[in-house]
Image (cartoon, grey):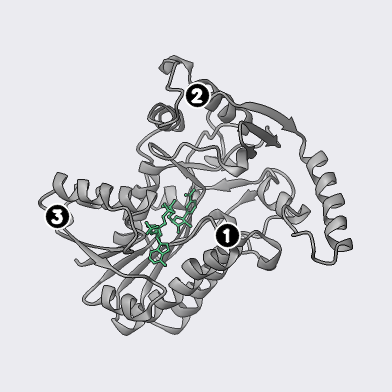
Amino acid sequence: MSILVTGASGFLGSHLVEHLCISGAKHLRCFVRPSSDLAKLNELRDKYPSTHLQYVVGNLLSLTDAYRAMEGIEVVYHLAAEMKGTAPTVFANTVVASRNILEAIVMQRVRRVVLVSSICVYGVAHLPRATVVTEDTELETQPERRDAYAFAKIRQEKLFQQYRRNHSFDLVILRPGVIYGEGRAELPSRAGLRLGPLILQIAAQNRLPLTYVSNCVTAVALAGLSLPEGSYNVVDENSPKAAEYVRLYRSLVEKITSVRLSRSSVLLLAHIFSRCVALSKGQIPAVLTPYQIKSTWGGHRFSNERLRAAGWNPRASTAEGILRAFQASNCPTQPRKTRQAVMVPPPSPLASSEN
Ligand SMILES: NC(=O)c1ccc[n+]([C@@H]2O[C@H](COP(=O)([O-])OP(=O)(O)OC[C@H]3O[C@@H](n4cnc5c(N)ncnc54)[C@H](OP(=O)(O)O)[C@@H]3O)[C@@H](O)[C@H]2O)c1
């Protein structure tokens, strides 16, 4: 089977490539940019000589490069996207790049396509706290009210669904929560807003919809092989509350000062700020609106039941994942606590996570 991985040089992509090598893939094509850091992929090429790792160097903003990468491919894992940066860059590398990939998929008659989307595509701002978000929950209908990343991921997913309706490839969409692991143990925005050595914890009692990278790649790999067409949330079980996650981070990774803010006080500030934005007639940028706060810190839960029922077995518990990620962190203050220091949150009866 010939496989293409886009975003192969990224955090999730390099873990996926390693997982596919271990699973016995004979030939893997990795789409990388001229500026991509290939250190991890080169390491994998040396470590798994029985897999032929081929690099296609280009940019998915070029349709020609997308066509070139897709020649002879049967299964595509599309991970490439831009998670940070200016809105136009995020849009281009997420949505324009996806349009080119989709054109190439159709042209080259690719059989199976796996899109790594995100749980941020759901429209949850109006849903009450503790609502369980399943794959049947409606996607966001007002993407323009969300941040640049969510806007782009919503547009990306809708584009894939539109092409699927008009063409004949199989499409599996995965919607991971916050992906963390060795090499990425930062505090996610769902845990609070980081301001230098300070973290403003918003809604510290919300459970974080986390997925440990090894668990997440197992789901992604499965999607390329045997998952029935459709969409699947990827969240681990027994996720910690934001407050607990920050406490462990402070204890194992880095001393930072945390300040707790209730969601209602942040909402009030956001309403006042929105008023100032309106009065400024666009002079002040509309960052962190009440709608965005309700979407990100609304205390919703994300079910993984569909993925579980389809045979997904997370490899590591959340407690193990957090411990490994935090201990491997490159932050200057190295781990000081032992394994016993990690508190295992109680099992959730819903087998789902909250954010
Ligand atoms: N991380 C999370 O918490 C999370 C949660 C939910 C969903 N996701 C989704 O998971 C996927 C992978 O995320 P990640 O954390 O691995 O992100 P990442 O580390 O930032 O990797 C993104 C990858 O996309 C590539 N890319 C960006 N623009 C490109 C372009 N124009 N042409 C070709 N390649 C391009 C990057 O190439 P360079 O190496 O050259 O920069 C990089 O390899 C993304 O689709 C993301 O939206 C992530």
Three-letter amino acid code at disc 2? Val
Image spot of residue 12 (x, y percent): 38, 50
Report the front residue among 228 and 273.
273
Residue 332 picture quarter: top left
Three-letter amino acid code at disc 1? Tyr
Left or right of 25 in this view: 133: right
Viewer-side label of 3, 2: 3
Viewer-side label of 1, 2: 1
The residue at which mark 2 appears reads as: 344
Quadrant containing the C terminus in the rendered view: top right
Image spot of residue 270 (x, y percent): 80, 49
The residue at which mark 3 appears reads as: 51
The answer to whether the beta carbon of the residue marked 1 is less than 8 Å from any atom of ligand 1 is yes
Q: Is residue 352 visible?
A: yes
Q: Are marks 1 and 2 in contact (CB under 8 Å)?
A: no
Residue visible at 32% across and 53% down?
A: 37
Q: Earlier in the sequence, mark 1 or mark 2?
A: 1
Picture quarter with ligand 1: bottom left
Q: Residues within 10 Å of mark 1 (few under 14, many from 20)?
A: many
Left or right of 169 in this view: 297: right
The answer to whether the beta carbon of the residue marked 3 is less than 8 Å from any atom of ligand 1 is no
Three-letter amino acid code at disc 3? Thr
